[in-house]
Image (cartoon, grey):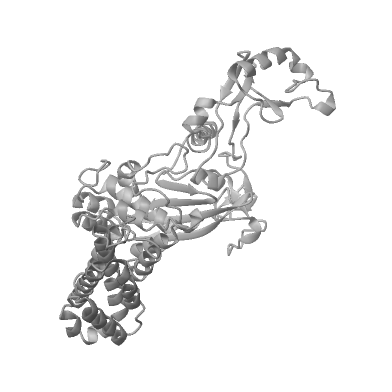
Amino acid sequence: MYLTGTDSQLEIFLKTVYDSLLDEYYNTSTPKQIEESTGFYYDTKKDEFVRFPKVKSMGIADIIFGKAPRPTGDKTAYVKEKEGATRKNQLPEEYAHLQDRLDAFLKENKLKADGATFLIDGRNAYQPNVTISPTPKKAKTTCYMCGHDTHAASEVSGTVFPLITSSAGIKSFNSGCESPFSVCWMCDYIGKFVPVPGYYSMNGDNTFIFLIYSQSFEKMNDVFEPFEGAKKYDANRFRNFEERLGAYFQKSYEQFFSFMYTVYLTTCTVNPGGEEESEIDLEALFDINISKAPVSFYVLQFQELGQSCIGKLVWNFTEAVYLFRLFAALFESEIDLKKVMQGFVDYDQPKNESKTIVRNRICEAILKKQHITDLVEPFVYHISRSEKKFIKPAFDFVEAYEHILYEGDTMKQELINTAVSLGKSIGLTLGTQGKKARGDLFRLRKARKPEDFLNEVNRIQMKYGASVTADLYNKGEAFDENFTEFKQFCMIAALNSYNAKTSDKPSSGEENHD
């Protein structure tokens, strides 16, 4: 794409585009800030005071340029007490004739003059400095980013490319680049732009960014409209997509998992954007993710450190088709993914940042097509250590998910079914005995070897009359080779059935707290 025109026309056009960029992405305000409009300036042409809302660059724009807003017009300092001020917010002599009107304006609108300066002919706003110089001139240096010679350059920094912390921390193999490294005015200009197919979520001092990418510019243009439907700012502009899986999504992988679920619902279902989940639209899935060129998602995490931020994660996710088909399969199996994700929150943790550590690991494993029984089994027993917990959504989910991963592997499918059947039988049998049989369940879980596990199963069978499927003893070598995973499935199923049975019919003298 090329822009043609006279030097002055190009300069005016680029300046207009830049001003529009700042208004749309940098100088943003929440509905509450707009309603309050606590800022003000004096308009000399209209001879009146004008209110304006506070602004804050959020998300991707804040990563590019997170400095404080500056006056867009003129300003003058209020007279300080040590300089002879006799009242609060006293204007200097040249504006003393406005003092009574200023006091009345502040009182009438219930405002306070924040800061030490009186603004004139313009509000405070974010104004990243850029040079717009389309007129050809003699080159002075070589651009670090694009390698072109340029007559107008600025020092390379994080406002040009967020992953660059300073010119001291970068290297270049271009012999024309001289230290300190510089960038041309065009790269500096483009570096301030916020990617339109970009989504973000801010949590504490972390900002998570999700960028849609394809090598085909035509494909990017085709998917722009459907992906734009997933955008929705929350009231405080802490994110620009709706969290359809509930709250407490704080860490990188769980944030991205939640984002991808929203993208799936708004782009690849027969009722995109609807309040309720619907079945998958395979044609839309193909058009958006496969047709012409594949689409991938870049996941980035930035963490604030003082006045700057550092990159913590850069990851390219290329398995959207797998993930969307997984969502569809869970829907067909009537798995409520929102309940599942809420069930993976450890509400007993005293610190909020610790409540979703395990869920983040589970989401990471799912995104990477890895098994999750080794994460889910210790988690459900951890949260159930002091009282019964409703873990059925977690059990149903892990069973369905692992069956999907082992699709086509008949032996593993049968092993899962045997483990689940055994766990249900043990859990229901022990559940009829109430709290006194709880120790037997945890004793079975402590078995570390196949023979010890089978001995504990036989003991429970003899003691309580549990029904044990003959398949357990027919698996032989397969059981030994997959013992750890088998036991994890069995113990999740057993705890789920035990909790369900003791909740439905508490034993004599036992109080049901659920």
**Where's residue 186, x and y in %?**
54, 45
**Where's residue 338, x and y in %?**
31, 51
Residue at 33 percent across and 68 percent down: it is: 372
Residue 223 position (above or below residue 394): above
Residue 269 position (above or below residue 407): above
258 relative to 177 in the view: left or right = left
Residue 398 visible somewhere in the drawing: no
Residue 85 visible somewhere in the drawing: yes
Quarter of the view holding residue 131: top right
Depth order, front residue of 320/196:
320
**Where's residue 471, x and y in %?**
16, 80
Residue at 22 percent across and 49 percent down: it is: 284
Depth order, front residue of 101/61:
101
Residue at 27 percent across and 85 percent down: it is: 455
267 relative to 27 in the view: left or right = left
Depth order, front residue of 54/441:
441
**Identity of the residue furthest to the front in this view:** 509
231 relative to 201 in the view: left or right = left
Say which quadrant the N terminus sits in: top left
**Where's residue 174, x and y in %?**
58, 62
| Total numbered badges shown on the rendered structure | 0
Depth order, front residue of 367/476:
476
59 relative to 415 in the view: left or right = right
Say which quadrant the C terminus sits in: bottom left
Quarter of the view holding residue 69: top right
**Identity of the residue furthest to the left in this view:** 470
